[in-house]
Image: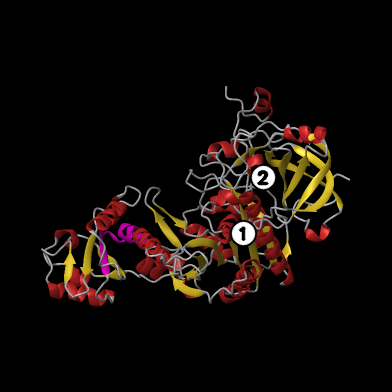
Amino acid sequence: MLRTHRCSELRLKNKGENVVLSGWVKKTRDLGGMTFIDLRDRYGITQLVFDMDQDENLCTKARKLGREYVIQVKGEVRERSNKNPNIPTGDIEISAKELSVLNESKTPPFTIEDETDGGEELRMKYRYLDLRRNINQRNIKLRHQLALEIRKYLSTNDFLEIETPYLIKSTPEGARDFVVPSRLHPGEFYALPQSPQTFKQLLMISGYDRYFQVVRCFRDEDFRADRQPEFTQIDCEMSFVERQDIFNIFEGMCKHIFKEIKNIDLPEVRLMSWDNALKYYGTDKPDIRFGMEFVELNDIAQNKGFKVFDSVELVVGINAKGCAGYSRKQLDKLTDFVKRPQIGAKGLVYVKYNDDGSFKSSVDKFFTRDDLKKWAERFNAKPGDLMLLLAGDKMHVRKQLSELRLEMGDQLNLRKRDEFAPLWIVDFPLLEWDEENERYHAMHHPFTAAHHEDTRLLEIEPEKARANAYDFVINGVEVGGGSIRIHDHDTQQKMFNALGFTKEEAEKQFGFLLKAFEYGAPPHGGIAFGFDRLVALFGGTDSIRDYIAFPKNNAGRDIMIDSPATITEMQLNELSLKVH
Ligand code: ASP
């Protein structure tokens, strides 16, 4: 037997037992006649003791062990004289009687500790060693538990997990496809799914009225921080449902996982229109753990001689409660923050509503006390508050102020890690205009239905139609999104028209779906959750990479296996890809 116990298991009650443990050498300490070793496995750490006086050879052998050697030890459980209250096995140690080296190890390129000395790049290259660290083991376990609870909840609610193919043909989800050349069909290509969208809809037509899948999706997008070219969705679809049915089931799912995994009762899920999300938070994924909603001031701040305000589409601000005491330096820092190229504001206007009721602002030259008083009323500001304003065109200024709002939320500690504020964002526009290509794009995807009363707009004013789509947002993170789908041939055809597809193009790309709609397609709708993001939200850190066993770096590379990589001339030939 290679082990009788795991490294987390033994306690005082096991005192006197002879046990066998196996694991990795975490640390060796030589103290005079004694050598102590921390032995580690996935479950924990147990201290081993080798005593010169008892067995000189054995002790000498132990002293030669390097970090991360894999060893097996037989010995007796003893009470420690020097107890360690920080680990569950801290009351005992193993007095070693036999030691075998199961495998040696080179000195690892970084320390396998919570506070490691290894940089990101090095840890990615040796990801299998990085994965030995506690924090990563915790994250990978969390991922497993979350998937398990989701599977349990959905299965209990009659959902079937059904696999859909990975070698398919392109589905438009707004990104580029990864393609796979076909050897047997020269010049032809499979595409890897950006999502199983069309397949899950076909399953509804097949009558599997509750489907889900924990599924890998592939999108060939430009690199951005924290994007992975392959990522995992909890993909779901239901038949005979309206929006509210979807909300009920998936609010239930989220409540279930928060309760089971965090023992948190998730608060009521709020509903917010896309328009209002942009108007009051400047983003379609607002963090509503705190208020600080946007206040628009055009009618009272324009035409007072301040050119910066007069020439713009929108003057808008937030009230940072209790911040009137901010120093010059703090205000300059905020100004620098909004002027950073990533944010791109031209400047920041501030108004301090001092404790004595007076105002001090960066625009005192242009506005009277009465003007500023009116602003304060609009902001619902009280003495002691600080109003921060930006001006510009709607789209940009809202985005900029949204960043500032989050920054102030952080500075004022209003974004509490253990608080979760979920909401549905609804009523997205169905289409958005693509300036560059001079055509409409589906904002969600082309299978999304318009609101019932807006369907007729598809043919006349498609830009005015609202989508029956919804995003699920928690703490400023879009964790899921979906829609009620079009389920009849003619409406789907009209949608493709509105998107600028000719009948032939639509037929070539989606003929299979259009045809299927002619064979009894039930009303249906669904949603997909970004599983990696959901795990990150539960884990309490921002980077999804921390929760993926073998992630790619920011440039989409796996630097451990060195991929992407070139292939041989012979492979290129076989795939008819040879560049002549
Ligand atoms: N397929 C969609 C996506 O990947 C989700 C959905 O509409 O169910 O975003």
Which mark sits nearer the N-terminus, 1 or 2? 2
Residue 202 visible in this rendered orientation of the protein? no
Residue 84 visible in this rendered orientation of the protein? yes
Return the residue nearer the eye: 107 or 456.
107
Picture quadrant where residue 296 is located: bottom left
Picture quadrant where residue 479 is located: bottom right
Asked if the magenta segment contains residue 52, the reply would be no
* Drawn side of residue 367 relative to residue 527, left or right: left
| Disc 1 residue type (three-letter) | Leu
In the rendered image, residue 557, in percent from the top left (x then y), is placed at 56, 38
In the rendered image, residue 87, in percent from the top left (x then y), is placed at 67, 56
In the rendered image, residue 165, in percent from the top left (x then y), is placed at 70, 50
Q: Magenta residues?
A: 386-402
Residue for badge 2? 132
Answer with the quadrant where ligand 1 appears in the image: bottom right
Residue for badge 1? 514
